[in-house]
Image (cartoon, rainbow, N blue to C red):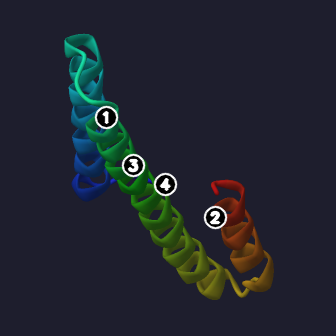
Amino acid sequence: MEYNSQVKNRIKRAEGQLRGILRMMEQGDDCKDVISQLSAAKTALDRSIGLIVSLNLVECVRDSHETGENTEDIVKEAVNLLVKSR
C-alpha cells in the first residue's frame, strides 16, 4: 500500500502533539492539561488507524474484484485490524 500525503500529515500532526506533551511535562504543566493533550493525540492516532485500514480495504476489495477473488476474508482481516488496535 502506498501511503498518501493525507495519511502522512495526520501522523506528523500526532508527532507534533506528542512533542508538545513532552514539553508540557518538562515544564511541569498541570496534570489535567497533559491528560487532555494525551487524549487528543490518542484520538488522532485512532483516526489515522481507521483511515489507513479503510484505504487499504478499498484497495484490496478493488483488486479482488479485478481478479475474481472472494472479498469476505479481506473484510474480516480489516475488521480484525480495527479490533486489535483498540
The amino acid at mark 2 is Leu
Q: Is residue 63 visible?
A: yes
The amino acid at mark 4 is Met
CA–CA distance in space, label 4 to label 2: 17 Å
Q: Is residue 70 visible?
A: no
Mark closer to the chain start, 1 or 4: 4
CA–CA distance in space, label 3 to label 2: 18 Å
How dense is the environment of label 2, judged by Cα within 10 Å: few (below 14), some, or many (20 and up)? some
Name the residue beneath numbered marker 4.
1
Q: In the picture provided, is 65 more to the left or to the right than 4?
A: right
Nearest the viewer among 10 and 16 is 16
Name the residue beneath numbered marker 1.
34
Mark closer to the chain start, 3 or 2: 3
Name the residue beneath numbered marker 3.
39
Image location (x, y in percent) of residue 6: 24, 57
How dense is the environment of label 4, judged by Cα within 10 Å: few (below 14), some, or many (20 and up)? few
Going 42% across and 50% down the picture, which residue do you hit? Answer: 45
Mark closer to the chain start, 1 or 3: 1
CA–CA distance in space, label 1 to label 4: 34 Å
Element type where label 2 sits in the image: helix
Image location (x, y in percent) of residue 28: 25, 16
Q: Quadrant of residue 25?
A: top left
Nearest the viewer among 6 and 47 is 47
Nearest the viewer among 43 and 75 is 43
CA–CA distance in space, label 4 to label 3: 28 Å
Query: Which of pointers 1 and 4 indicates the residue nearer the eye?
Result: 1
How dense is the environment of label 3, judged by Cα within 10 Å: few (below 14), some, or many (20 and up)? few
* Numbered label attached to residue 78: none
Is 80 located above or below residue 44 in the figure? below
Residue that sits furthest to the top in the current view: 26
Name the residue beneath numbered marker 2.
82
